[in-house]
């Protein structure tokens, strides 16, 4: 795996991609998302998966800045959903205290979309999908609760994701666990 310099010291830079580079993983991911969503009791349509990848910080930040200058009337604040931006590049603030490996993202205000980093091992991809689907469930069932209880919400999501291998063993057979 090629290491991409995507951190400028303040932000990590990413780029939305139209599909997972491995079409087989994408197919398994969508089927797995459906199984997890059904297990969690999510309403249909199930959350859309948006794939994204680390991007070179110089190129990504310049594309973002160009898009900003073309549409300064839009809200470009870090609190906005990066998946709704007209620019394919986006950034997440660097948090020094954050020790968990970043694998996915679900915006607090919807829409029901989960972003999944596409440079993960297949088993990590599946765990990220389970984790983010729990966040969708939290937002559906108790709007606003997840952002007021970030640590507990993440702990619950991670606990569910850790058990995904046992809940859905057919997806994890012969995978890179």
Image: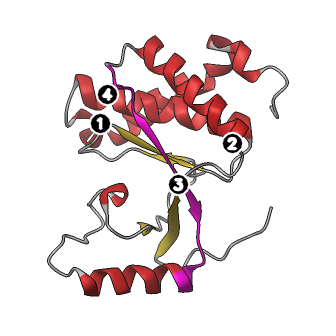
Pointer 1 with pointer 4, Cβ within 8 A: yes
The answer for how far apart the CA atoms under marks 1 and 3 are is 28 Å
Q: Which is nearer the N-term, disc 1 or disc 3?
A: 3
Quadrant (top left/top right/bottom left/bottom right) for the N terminus: bottom right
In the rendered structure, which segment of residues is drawn in magenta?
Answer: 44-59
Which secondary structure lies at badge 2? Answer: helix
The answer for how far apart the CA atoms under marks 2 and 3 are is 11 Å
User: To which quarter of the image does residue 78 belong?
Assistant: bottom left
Task: Tell us which disc is closer to us: 1 or 4.
Answer: 4
| Horizontal side, residue 97 vs residue 170: left or right | left
User: To which quarter of the image does residue 124 belong?
Assistant: top right
The answer for how far apart the CA atoms under marks 2 and 1 are is 32 Å
Q: Which is nearer the N-term, disc 1 or disc 4?
A: 4
* Residue 25 badge: none
The answer for how far apart the CA atoms under marks 4 and 3 are is 27 Å
Q: Tell me what residue is drawn at x 54 percent, y 34 percent.
A: 129
Q: Which is nearer the N-term, disc 4 or disc 3?
A: 3
**Residue 9 appears in view:** no
Q: Residues within 10 Å of mark 3 (few under 14, many from 20)?
A: few
Residue farthest left in this picture: 73
Q: Residues within 10 Å of mark 2 (few under 14, many from 20)?
A: few
The answer for how far apart the CA atoms under marks 1 and 4 are is 6 Å
Pointer 2 with pointer 1, Cβ within 8 A: no
Q: Decide: is 64 above or below 150.
A: below
* Residue 138 badge: 4
Horizontal and vertical percent for residue 70? 26, 84
Pointer 2 with pointer 3, Cβ within 8 A: no
Q: Which is nearer the N-term, disc 2 or disc 3?
A: 3
Which secondary structure lies at badge 3? Answer: loop
Taking depth in this image into account, of 106 and 51 the one nearest to the observer is: 51
Name the residue that disc number 1 marks: 146
Pointer 2 with pointer 4, Cβ within 8 A: no
């Amino acid at each position: 795996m090629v290491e991409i310099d995507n951190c400028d010291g303040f932000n990590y830079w990413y780029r939305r991609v139209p599909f997972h580079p491995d079409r087989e993983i994408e197919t398994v991911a969508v089927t797995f998302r459906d199984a997890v969503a059904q297990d969690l009791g999510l309403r249909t349509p199930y959350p859309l998966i948006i794939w994204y990848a680390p991007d070179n910080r110089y190129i990504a930040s310049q594309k973002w800045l160009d898009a900003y200058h073309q549409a300064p009337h839009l809200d470009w604040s870090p609190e906005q959903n990066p998946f709704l931006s007209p620019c394919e590049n986006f950034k997440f603030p660097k948090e020094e205290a954050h020790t968990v490996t970043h694998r996915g993202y679900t915006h607090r205000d919807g829409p029901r979309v989960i972003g999944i980093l596409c440079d993960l091992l297949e088993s990590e991809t599946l765990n990220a999908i389970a984790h983010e689907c729990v966040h969708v469930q939290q937002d559906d069932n108790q709007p606003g609760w997840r952002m007021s209880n970030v640590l507990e919400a993440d702990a619950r999501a991670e606990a569910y994701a850790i058990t995904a291998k046992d809940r859905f063993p057919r997806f994890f057979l012969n995978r890179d666990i």
